[in-house]
Image (cartoon, rainbow, N blue to C red):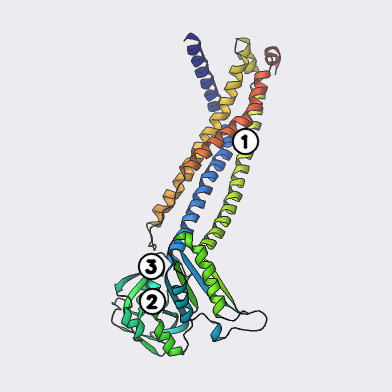
Amino acid sequence: MEIRTNSIVVLGETARLALQALRSNKLRALLTMLGVIIGSACIVLVVTVALAGKRYIIAQIEGVGANLVFAEVIRAGGAQTTTPADEISLADREAVKEGIPQVVETAGTREIPMVVVVGSIEHPISLVGVTDGFEQIRHLVVDRGRYFDEDDMTSRSKVCLITPQLAGAVFPNEDPVGKEIHVGELAFTVIGVFRERIATFGQSEITPESVIVPFSLIRYYTGEEYIKTFYAQADKPEDVEMVTRQVQEILNSRHRSEVEYRVQNLASILETARHISMAMTIVLVVIAMIALAISGIGIMNIMLVTVTERTREIGIRKAVGAKRAAILYQFLLEALMISGTGALTGIAIAVAIPFLLEALLSLFPVPQDIHVPISWISVVIAFVVSCSTGLIFGYLPANKAAQLQPTDSLRYE
């Protein structure tokens, strides 16, 4: 018990001397820990950015639709172009729906660029014809009015839904439901105002200037029944790859062999995005590690200078009975205090930035609540790595101080 008490007393005295030494050179200690502050903050922020990016990607995919497979025609090789017979048709849609049991819903769209005249000014818009099943696959939200019913889809009713942005431009300070909107030379009755459940920011056929109408209207006006983009929704995530292959096979078997069809699923896009995110994360982590290494070298250099300046102090301590281990621990504690304090400061800054960002974003109108996730595992890793850096790079100066001979140290000028 007495030995343990003595050890605690010695350790406390060593810590007091280390803290006193740092206080006597505050500016030097602050500049030394600056690199640690930057490095530890970078580690936390890198992981935070990676998590926020991953969450954003998942949100975009959910906005397009879950378990989704989509297909479109690609022009044939050489100078040959596709013909209307090569396009994906409503019959192809039925063949996929009936031929693949794992497909729970299908839909198709076709876009036509048009204009809307507002106050004698023409605004370009996109007239999108949609089949039944589109609302379910894309999870559209109708804020006002209603969505298309079965009669609208089959009877070529001249009805449409518009986006909130277009409603504000065409019908400012008015309820657009029930009013007519003139798209080119065509007139449609607005039956609803819709939006995407999660904004895809124009990454799909739905844009802020979109007007959606029943596909039967597009077919009636153009005389063609092909669809530009075809969607198939798998029953379960594990069925997506199989559905993708079978959709490809059905389209190839029903059309000319010279024409290619691009059939993709969101799983492959997500995987690609994850690889890109991982690569960027690795690069940023390497940069953070370089910053920590530089800060460690700075700690080592400053500590070596400190050992030289305090040679007589070390000699006096050894002359009055201080052991080698006590000197070693004192300088290691100084390095640990520098790196530990720097780590805590850097982590505090890194954690505060997302909270400040969320607070600032809350002051502005945004389409949805934005939350920047913080990984507490990255906080622990940043603290451990930063402290380890201080100990590793502080060992050489500490060992040098511990190896000094009392007689040589006392004669040092």
| Image height of 262 relative to 183, above or below | above
The reply, left or right, for residue 239 in relation to residue 175 is right
The x and y percentages for residue 65 are 43, 66
Q: Do the CB atoms of the residues marked 1 and 3 lie less than 8 Å apart?
A: no
Foreground mark, 1 or 2, reads 2
Provide the secondary structure element on which disc 1 rests. helix
| Image height of 109 relative to 364, above or below | below
Q: Earlier in the sequence, mark 1 or mark 2?
A: 2
Mark linked to residue 296: 1
Alpha-carbon neighbours of circle 1 within 10 Å: few (<14), some, or many (≥20)? Answer: many
Provide the secondary structure element on which disc 3 rests. loop
Foreground mark, 3 or 2, reads 2
* Three-letter code, disc 1: Gly
Alpha carbon of mark 1 to alpha carbon of mark 3: how far?
52 Å
Give 61 or 104, whichever is nearer the viewer.
Answer: 104
Residue in the picture at 63% in, 24% down: 398
The x and y percentages for residue 378 are 50, 42
Q: Earlier in the sequence, mark 3 or mark 2?
A: 2
Alpha carbon of mark 3 to alpha carbon of mark 2: how far?
13 Å
Alpha carbon of mark 1 to alpha carbon of mark 2: how far?
63 Å
Alpha-carbon neighbours of circle 3 within 10 Å: few (<14), some, or many (≥20)? Answer: some
Residue under label 3: 139
The x and y percentages for residue 242 are 51, 64
Residue under label 2: 132
Mark linked to residue 190: none
| Image height of 147 relative to 290, above or below | below
**Looking at the image, can residue 121 be seen?**
no
Find residue 396 and report its image quarter. top right
Provide the secondary structure element on which disc 2 rests. loop
Find residue 189 and report its image quarter. bottom left
Give 224 or 352, whichever is nearer the viewer.
Answer: 224
